[in-house]
Amino acid sequence: MAAKNLCGLLRTKTAYYRTPQGERMFDADSTTACYTCLTTQRPYGPDGMPADAHSCGEERGCFEQEK
């Protein structure tokens, strides 16, 4: 599962599942996950950097807190 605060716009096929505590379920070490940014609808964010569990954190200018 995700250890860091991920962007609310990051999606993958498991992004719609949640733990009993309500947290999104991401396996950052998955070798088969295909990530998408909801802003660009592409595998990269509006800043041109990759959209994935290792890259989409608070340090990015395009980061949006999950609501």
Image (spheres, rainbow, N blue to C red):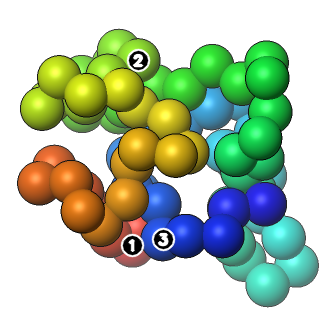
Cα distance between the residues tagged 2 and 3: 19 Å
Q: Amino acid at mark 1?
A: Lys
Q: Check the image and report above or below for 31 versus 12.
A: above
In this figure, which residue is indicated by the disc labeled 1?
A: 67
Q: Is residue 65 left or right of residue 52?
A: left
Q: Check the image and report above or below for 65 versus 56.
A: below
Q: Is residue 1 left or right of residue 9?
A: right
Are discs 2 and 3 less than 8 Å apart at CB?
no
Counting residues from the start of the chain, the first of labels 1 and 2 encountered is 2
**Nearest the camera: 57 or 65?**
57
Counting residues from the start of the chain, the first of labels 1 and 3 encountered is 3
In this figure, which residue is indicated by the disc labeled 3?
A: 5
The x and y percentages for residue 16 are 69, 46
Q: In which image quadrant can residue 14 be found?
A: top right
Residue at horizontal 54 percent and vertical 26 percent from the top: 35
Q: Is residue 1 left or right of residue 65?
A: right
Counting residues from the start of the chain, the first of labels 2 and 3 encountered is 3
Q: Amino acid at mark 3?
A: Asn
Camera-nearest label, 1 or 3: 3
Q: Residues within 10 Å of mark 1 (few under 14, many from 20)?
A: few
Quarter of the image for the N terminus: give it. Answer: bottom right
Q: Check the image and report above or below for 64 versus 42.
A: below
Residue at horizontal 48 percent and vertical 71 percent from the top: 5
Q: Is residue 30 left or right of residue 16?
A: right
Cα distance between the residues tagged 1 and 2: 22 Å
The x and y percentages for residue 21 are 79, 84
> Outermost residue, right direction?
20
Quarter of the image for the C terminus: give it. Answer: bottom left
In this figure, which residue is indicated by the disc labeled 2?
A: 43
Q: Residues within 10 Å of mark 3 (few under 14, many from 20)?
A: few
Badge 1 marks a residue whose secondary structure is loop
Q: Amino acid at mark 2?
A: Pro
